[in-house]
Amino acid sequence: QVQLVESGGGLVQPGGSLRLACAATGFSLDYYAFGWFRQAPGKEREGVLCLVHSDGSTYCADSVKGRFTISRDSTKNTVYLQMDSLSPEDTAVYYCAASTIVATYSNWEPDYWGQGTQVTVSS
């Protein structure tokens, strides 16, 4: 059974940091690309924020580059999203997703999705 389970969301003050985790079951990080998306209240889901390829190379969108970092731990079969310098505009449900193929970053549609974890940035 393939499954993605996100954790690490919560309430954080502006300027703070959070690290999200995505535990993958039934996947091998060596054969899948994993990425993070988000959907803010009342808005459409954004394109991929950050992605780690099966070879370990990473990509982050310009909108979060320098603040968000994606990494993976193959021993734990887990992908992480480190988020720094958070602002209220980062408030959203964050989703982990995976697929074997990444055609383009701008319209990547993964095959597998987690249930999401809420991140709220507020004072």
Image (tube, rainbow, N blue to C red):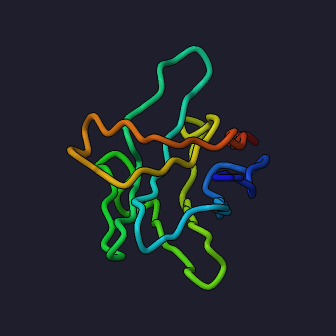
Q: Is residue 92 visible?
A: yes
Identified at 30% across, 61% down, the residue is 59
Q: With 19 as the anchor, is 10 left or right in this view?
A: right
Q: x%, y% of residue 54? A: 36, 69
Residue depicted at x 57% and y 44%? 87
Residue 67 drawn above or below residue 38: below
**87 horizontally vs 54: left or right:** right
Picture quadrant of residue 21: bottom right
Camera-nearest residue between 119 and 13: 119
Query: In which quadrant will I find the C terminus?
Result: top right
Evaluate whether residue 21 shows in this view: no
The quarter holding residue 94 reads top right
Q: At 64% from the left edge and 49% from the top edge, which residue is drawn?
A: 14
Q: Relative to residue 71, is residue 41 depicted above or below?
A: above
**Residue farthest toward the left in the current orientation of the protein:** 104
Among all residues in the image, which is located at the extreme bottom? 75
Number of labels in the image equals 0
Give the answer, above or below, for where 24 lies relative to 121.
below
| Farthest-out residue, top | 42
The image shows residue 77, relative to residue 63, as above or below, that is below
Which residue is located at x 57 percent, y 51 percent?
A: 86
Q: Position of residue 100 (x, y in %)?
A: 37, 55
Horizontal side of 77 relative to 63 (left or right) equals right
Q: Quadrant of residue 84?
A: bottom right
